[in-house]
Image (spheres, rainbow, N blue to C red):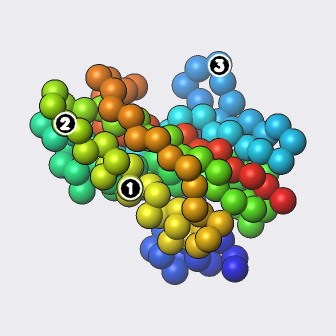
Amino acid sequence: MDVYQRLRDCGYSIPEAPKPVASYLPAKQHNDVVYSSGQTGTINGELTFRGKVANDVSIPDAQQSAKVAVLNCLAAIEITIGDLNRIAEIVRLTGYVASSSGFSLQPQVVEGASRLLLDVFGDKGQHARSAIGVAELPSNAPVEVELIVRVA
């Protein structure tokens, strides 16, 4: 299965990788494992949504932000490995959700990213996951995502 064709079939494409805003790499490879830096739901440097989930951003919009963030993670990984078809499996997804007081549905938000990975990578997309509620994220983003993948 060609990952790029599967992305197109699912209505997605890999964006240009966001540029780091400080002293870090977008992704780093160690042996056959690649770690992405945290990515938010930006398109061309602009956040798709801003604010805390529940009060400012709806769950469906936050799920969309998680999808864009995971696509940005894949873009960072692509720069590091050259071809996303080299991904043997998605190992772990960590999602951080800027949450309004009392909001406890972080797993529903991060599910947006998980579903995208499963839709695109099939069985290779099955992963361990954490969905963590936080008080604030950079630039008032509602979601930040990190990926760990194993490459062939």
Task: Indicate the amino acid at tag 3.
Answer: Ser
Residue marked by disc 2: 103
> Which residue extends farthest right?
31
Identify whether 107 is placed above or below 83.
Answer: above
The local crowd at label 3, few if under 14, some if 14 to 19, many if 20 or more residues have their Cα within 10 Å, is: few
Residue marked by disc 1: 111
Identify whether 4 is placed above or below 143.
Answer: below
Task: Indicate the amino acid at tag 2.
Answer: Phe
Determine whether the residue tagged by mark 2 lies in a helix, strand or loop: loop
Quadrant housing the N terminus: bottom right
Residue marked by disc 3: 23
Dots 2, 1 in contact, CB < 8 A: no
Q: Position of residue 101 (x, y in %)?
A: 16, 27
**N-terminal-most mark, 3 or 1:** 3
Determine whether the residue tagged by mark 1 lies in a helix, strand or loop: helix
Q: How far apart in space, not on screen, are marks 3 and 2 (Cα)?
A: 32 Å
**N-terminal-most mark, 3 or 2:** 3
Point 55% across, 25% down: residue? 21
Point 52% across, 54% down: residue? 71
